[in-house]
Amino acid sequence: RRNVLAVTAAALMMPALIGSGFAQDKKVIRISTPANDAEWQAKGLAKFKEMVEANSPTLEVQIHLNATLFDQGTEIPAMQRGNLEVGMISPQDVASYIPEYSVFTAGYLLRDAEHMHKVYGDSEVGKEYRQRVRDDIEVEILGSQYLGTRHVILRELKDVKTPADLAGLKLRVPGSDTWQFLGKALGANPTPIAFDEVYLALSTGTVDGLENPIADMIAAKFDEVSEQLVLTGHMVAPLFFAMSSSFWDSLTDEEKKVVADAVAAQSALVDEGTLATEADGVALLESHGMTVTTPDLDAFRSHVQQEYLNSDYAKEWPAGLIDKINAL
Ligand code: KDO
């Protein structure tokens, strides 16, 4: 007679034995971003993966570029539903959930990368920001990086001195309301298009231009399908490395340390690379045949700032926050 009990016991133990120490036991960190593989962001994420997997036997990292896993702007709900561990998100994504934080999406708010790191770093403003995002959205901002300073890019040459010169132009901006408002504040007609569809939209003339950082413009080869870069410098843009809070809470202290160290290395690589590309970017673009012009910056700054101050957004901004940001 077969020993049914013994067979059953062995069968029950099998999965546990096979599972221990094997890949299927690992906690998987899925990362979603619209960035392409030529961007500093992608190089930073490759570094993150390398460091995490070298330093933790229990963590695995999967990088999904070009918005192939989740569409641009849908990373937060994906993290909230437990379908994604990390989204590379922007203050505009945060403002869709915390309306008064639209203040962080205003044009000409931050001076440069250093100021940006003070604002989102260890300052009171930064600590409060991260706490509020944790409380309201349930994601942890583990790091901020410099995406770049945004400028206007035009498909065809145009004499642009002031925002009035952009009137009637279809300017691509990302999908959410605060991004659309930026396009309007710059004086143009904003059109929502996802990042990975911009090259095609420019080449077919669906839009007259966009606004983007120089490093991303070079990585996405937008210069192949546009003629002019107008150095408006209207936004010093951060990007956040954001992890679902429930996933973060499920990590051991050791795993958290490995992740935090790798995020710091990722952000540092992106910052350094982006600043270096920006330093050489104008010369490179000119050598590719682009015309690079400088508009009346005071006219752009005062127009854009007035548009924001007069907007409904500003009615919700926390009192005194802009002064605190300016003082950093
Ligand atoms: C873009 O779509 O223009 C943008 O620059 C917006 C950013 O917030 C960020 O999503 C970025 O794209 C992507 O990460 C690609 O670099």
Image (cartoon, rainbow, N blue to C red):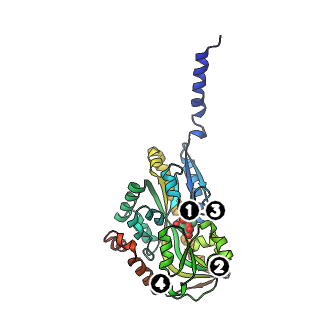
Residue named by callout 2: 226
Q: Which circle, 2 or 1, is nearer the viewer?
A: 1
Mark 4 residue CB less than 8 A from any atom of ligand 1: no
Q: What's the amino acid at mark 1?
A: Gln
Residue 249: x and y in percent read 44, 46
Q: Amino acid at mark 4?
A: Phe
Quick one: 311 or 68, which is closer to the camera?
Answer: 311
Is the Cβ of the residue at disc 1 closer than 8 Å to that at disc 4?
A: no
Question: Which x, y percent locates residue 165?
Answer: 54, 87
Quadrant in the picture for residue 1? top right
Give the mark toward the camera: 1 or 4. Answer: 1
Element at label 3: loop
What label sits on residue 35 in the rendered view?
A: none
Q: Are marks 1 and 3 in contact (CB under 8 Å)?
A: no
Q: At which x and y percent is residue 314?
A: 37, 73
Q: Specify the label residue 72 is tagged with.
A: 1
Q: Which residue is label 3 attached to?
A: 37
Disc 3 marks a residue whose amino acid type is Asp
Task: Look at the numbered disc 1 and say if its residue's Cβ is closer than 8 Å to ligand 1.
Answer: yes
